[in-house]
Amino acid sequence: MIIENGKQFDRSIIRRLLEPKKHPQTDLAWKFLVSGTLKSQTLILRLLYQTEKKRGVSSLQFCSAVNVVISHLIQLDEIDKALVVLSKCVPKATLTTLRHCLMAADSEQTLETFWSLTKISGQAKAYKLEEVYVAALTKFNYQKAKSILLESPEAMGREAWRALLEKAGDLKNFNDLYNLFQFSRQHNITRKIETVFFQSLAKIFPEEVYAKFKKQAAYGSNFKETKLLALLHPRLLSRIQLNLSRDRSIWSIPLLGFLANSNLARARDVLRYAERVEGKPNRQMYLSCLKYSRRQKSPEDVREFSRLHKECEKATSIEIAQRLSASKK
């Protein structure tokens, strides 16, 4: 009988789960073991080692087991244990697993350790995941992440740019936002990031961006601010709407700008205006207000937006059902 953290688990169950002839190894079996019993990283590694040596277990099966264990440990917030398992089995880690590890890092030190292991796993994998590393690094060391992106912009995809632009908006750092946008223009990648750019601009200038969305005049306090606000012309807004997913409204951009500045009253104004313009409420916008209200721990607002979000979801479901019914006729 194995005892882990006060829990008892019969060895025969583990043997049956790991026996390839009678009970083939499955991803579900590993998740069950990691969730319920294997709180010891030593025991996890021992079982992985035994699995690798078992007759009848293919290299592909073992590789799958390693990746399931690491990914599930991350889901359970067992980051340190995931790191230990990865360090022993890094050649077997897939790009997806390495991505999960980088994004799940809870400190800069842990992130750097994961990144070192990623580079050990192969230069091809490291090259493909560099933008994920930069995006994760933004949470802990914004300046370092920005320096890496500016040094090798061609190697960076949308994920790294998005993280840096969002951070500049969260910090209300207009100069960084302006410089990143200008840099993106020099390297012809502006269209890939323009939606998140204007979301960040709305966090810094919520009233001005809202005015531009309503096709009203808006000016900054200097040339740079006015220049960026002038980009919000009707043709660009139409393009942004096309780039957004079907269930998102373009009005979510000024809405998130006001919420980022703790101005729920103005966010409500955006909701009302958007409903008049589009003819119906948008559930994603209600969901954004609901999440904000929960963060603010406001019971009345939580109840209100929870109700509105549910009503909107119900209306959307009915609309989808009607469209499907009409398409079958």
Image: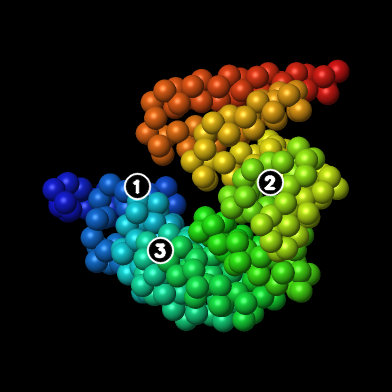
Please tell me which residue lies in front, 16 or 121: 121
Judged from the image, the secondary structure of the residue bearing numbered disc 3 is loop
Q: Quadrant of residue 25?
A: bottom left
Q: Nearer the viewer, mark 2 or mark 1?
A: 2
At label 3, counting other C-alpha atoms closer than 10 Å, the crowd grade (few under 14, some 14-19, many 20 or more) is many
Is 123 placed above or below 9 here? below
The residue under label 3 is 105
Q: Which mark is residue 32?
A: 1
* Residue ID at (31%, 64%): 80
Which amino acid is tagged 2? Val
CA gap between label 2 and label 1 equals: 50 Å
Please tell me which residue lies in front, 18 or 287: 287
Relative to residue 314, is residue 214 drawn left or right? right
* Residue ID at (54%, 31%): 265
Judged from the image, the secondary structure of the residue bearing numbered disc 1 is helix
- The answer to whether residue 161 is visible is no
* Residue ID at (45%, 26%): 301
The picture places residue 315, in percent across and down from the top left corner, at 65, 19
Q: Quadrant of residue 41?
A: bottom left
Q: Which mark is residue 209?
A: 2
Which amino acid is tagged 1? Phe
- The answer to whether residue 42 is visible is yes
